[in-house]
Image: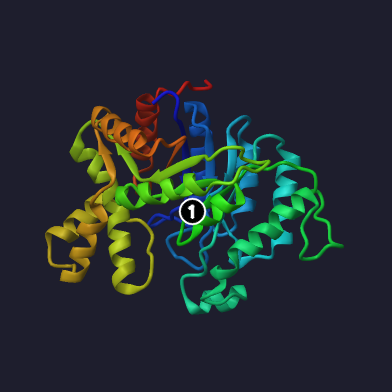
Amino acid sequence: MRTTQFSILDRSRTREGHPPGTALRDTVELARHAERLGYHRFWVAEHHGVPGVAGSAPTVLAAAVASATTAIRVGTGGVMLPNHRPLVVAEQFGVLASLFPGRIDMGLGRSVGFTGGIRRALGTGKDAAEGFEAQLAELLGYFTGAQSAHPQVHARPAEGLTVPAFVLATGAGAQVAARAGLALVIGDFRAPVKVLAAVEEYRAAFRPSALWPRPYVVISGTVAVAGTTAAARRLLVPEARAMAFARTHGVFPPLRPAADVEREVAGDGMSARERDGYAQALRGHVHGTPEQVAADLGALIERTAADEVLVTTSTYDRAALLESFERLAGVAGLVGRG
């Protein structure tokens, strides 16, 4: 796996008993840790009005991450274009790329707000994702000076800068990435057949661009590495419980300690629907000892011919999470920066 890049996406998950600010500071510290271990990129995400996620302003958080590190690439996974005006996004990335030249990535998605109230507050509608391709073209045009939506408008300081752009493959994202000649980010590991089909479609339809002369595929998913399979599975427990709760209550909560979740599962505190959702949320992720993870990831990389793996692991125990990324760095053969 030495020829495959490994990167991290952190969603700034909040933890029960800790304020959101702690989650954001933990994200910055994790970026420092990732840089020391030799990871290629560190990305942050965009979520609005979610109790369990503190990362609501990805370009602001990316600036904090870039300021706290020196060499690792920093970006977004991603900025959701339906929530923003392309001019503003171009300006934000222009500022980032000017402050941290050669280190900024522009990951872009087409998702809209989770609830009607959030969508209204953002000034978007449920069908806003349908305009993603046009928004993307306008955004990219602000960097080249060739955008036609508002020909008299120039994005400063973005115009003339080269910022690598990636499309997150939700819905029609793979086709849009291929037509625009951009890199593709696709997950998750639990649906390999679907991922492989989208990757093949993307490569077949790819049109070379100034940003990406050839297709570039990033596969994304959860990876947990520990000394034993059971310990690695335990890292998945807090996020699985949060996912099950969200699907049954409509609210994505902060992470709880694995021991608390396991007591709840062993008792009678969960409905049958929640138990089903919890079991489903635990399935299919890459986890285990370094040897097991190396075999599973190696098979995924070989099957998809991925250029890069973007890992997005969340758990309550921060020390165990850092150790998991350290073990994964060993699996991937990364060379730390000291």
Badge 1: how crowded within 10 Å, few (<14), some, or many (20+)?
A: many
Figure check: 81 above or below 124 = above
- Tell me the quadrant of the picture where the N terminus can be found: top left
**x 52%, y 68%: residue:** 112
Q: In the depicted view, which residue is nearer to us: 323 or 222?
A: 222
State the image coordinates of residue 248 (x, y, percent, origin top left): 29, 72
Q: In the depicted view, which residue is nearer to us: 87 or 167?
A: 167
Would residue 312 be visible to someone looking at this image?
A: no
**For residue 148, side relative to residue 273 (left or right):** right
**For residue 5, side relative to residue 101 (left or right):** left
Q: Quadrant of residue 250?
A: bottom left
State the image coordinates of residue 81 (x, y, percent, origin top left): 60, 62
Looking at the rendered structure, the kind of residue marked 1 is Ala
Figure check: 246 above or below 295 = below
**x 18%, y 64%: residue:** 275
**x 32%, y 54%: residue:** 239
State the image coordinates of residue 253 (x, y, percent, origin top left): 37, 64
Figure check: 203 above or below 112 = above
**x 31%, y 40%: residue:** 224
Q: In the depicted view, which residue is nearer to us: 141 or 107?
A: 141
**For residue 23, side relative to residue 144 (left or right):** left
Q: In the depicted view, which residue is nearer to us: 18 or 251?
A: 251
Considering every residue shown, the one lying at the far front of the view is 204
Read off the residue under disc 1. 174
